[in-house]
Amino acid sequence: MAEASSSTTTHTDQPVVATQRLTKVFRDFWMRSRAKAVDDLTIEIRPREVFGLLGPNGSGKSTTIKLMLGLLRPSSGRLLVFGKRPTDVAIKRRIGYLPEESYLYPFLNARETLDYYARLFEIDHRTRAKRVDELLDMVGLTHAQFRPVREYSKGMQRRIGLAQALINDPDLLILDEPTTGLDPIGTRQVKDLIIELGRRGKTIVLSSHLLSDVEDVVDRMVILYGGKVRGEGTCEQLLEEHNKTTIETDSLDEDTLAEIDALIRRRSGGEKAVLSVSHPRQKLEELFLGIVEQARSERLETAGVQQGGQTAAFLRSGEPEGGEALIDRLVRDDTPEPMPAPVEGQTPAAPPTDESDSLIDALVEGDSAPAPEAPASPPPAIAADEDVDDSVIGSLLDTPDASKREEA
């Protein structure tokens, strides 16, 4: 029993993504080393964790993500996703990916776009329609769902790209710069969504240049530079300053502050003192969102994106739908409708027949079938003894026989 329990624990605690000395070197045509994008990278991303992948441009973030997706092959080292190589097709169904740039078909509208990607995952019609409705409401694009994507702003395309990444209800969600092009409202919604999905048990990899956004949502992060890990840990571990202490109180007068400063100097032997006194500031994001909420409460009209709804129901649920899913599989759209019950005193209508059935009936009836109509008679032929001008015909045909008749 102890062995079985141990093996179960090991399987449950298996990292979703694990790399060991992962290296990716880009080479030129002559196979000479051109750039080492990822250098000896060893990280683990645990289940139900929001993991931040940070670093300046060219630090290897996007290359690492492409290696996780199997879009690039490593030059050396090991990489496992769900315990398998990233090139294994079976794990693709469990991954959602939002690239740095949204590559969408411009001639499709939002609804057709989500339906298309849902079909790629072989999601049945009923589930597709339900998820598309929920995702469009979640990202605030229900009112613009029938507009072609080419007419969308960058922020609107980013929203539909995020919905596309969630259409298959993935276990691992990879977001590369998810808030690029979004206004502060959309940025806040994306951050709230990431927090909610992490709470629901999703594993999320977040890559972003906006450090404040990452700080608000991630559980743990790594900071890359030159393809190497330069820092790793939780936000508290990396951001906490141990050489200073902050005390927050209600507003104090000058005399009280002077007494506190004197007490600190006396207790520390003059080595420490009050370095600065300031009043807390409201964040610009909080001020912005407060103004927007006030405008919405006054019912002011806007041509921009509407406020997004709640997180899609299928993303909030951590368990399968159970009996409802079974019914959806059994009841399909192509199921024929039942025939209406016959009314008393009326002859029930015959079921519709196709052309092949009517042809078989005609053949089976045989002699009882009515005789087919006789074809129309052909036009009368010219009589043999009718006078014909052979000379005209001969001149037209210009044959030897005709010339002989002319000499005669």
Image (tube, grey):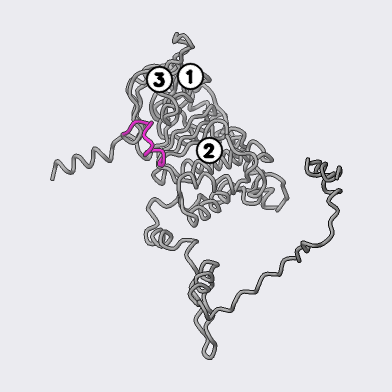
User: Is residue 170 in the magenta section?
Assistant: no
Residue toward you, 241 or 336: 336
Q: Mark 3 to mark 1: distance in Å?
A: 10 Å
Q: What residue is shown at x 47% (from left), y 25% (from top)?
A: 54
Quick check: 328 above or below 287? below
Give the x, y percent position of residue 103.
Answer: 58, 34
Name the residue located 41 percent from the left edge and 46 percent from the top edge: 200
Q: Which residue is drawn at 65% across and 73% down?
A: 374
**Secondary structure state at the residue bearing disc 2:** loop
**Residue for badge 1:** 59
Comes first in the chain, label 2 or label 3: 3
From the image, state whether disc 2 or disc 3 is nearer to you: 3
Front-most of residues 402 and 329: 402
> First in sequence: mark 2 or mark 1?
1
Image vertical order of residue 282 relative to residue 60, above or below: below
Secondary structure of the residue carrying tag 1 is loop
Residue on which disc 2 sits: 250
Cα–Cα span, label 2 and label 1 = 44 Å
**C-alpha separation, residue under disc 2 versus residue under disc 3:** 42 Å
- Residue type at tag 2: Asp
Left or right of residue 208: residue 18: left
Q: Can residue 350 be seen in this view?
A: yes
The quarter in which the N terminus is drawn is top left
Mark 3 residue element: strand
* Residue under numbered circle 3: 229
**Camera-side mark, 2 or 1:** 1
Residue 266 rendering spot, x and y as whole percentages: 42, 20
Which callout, 3 or 1, points to the residue nearer the camera? 1
Q: What stretch is highlighted in magenta?
A: 84-94
Packing grade of label 1 (10 A; few <14, some 14-19, many >=20) is: many
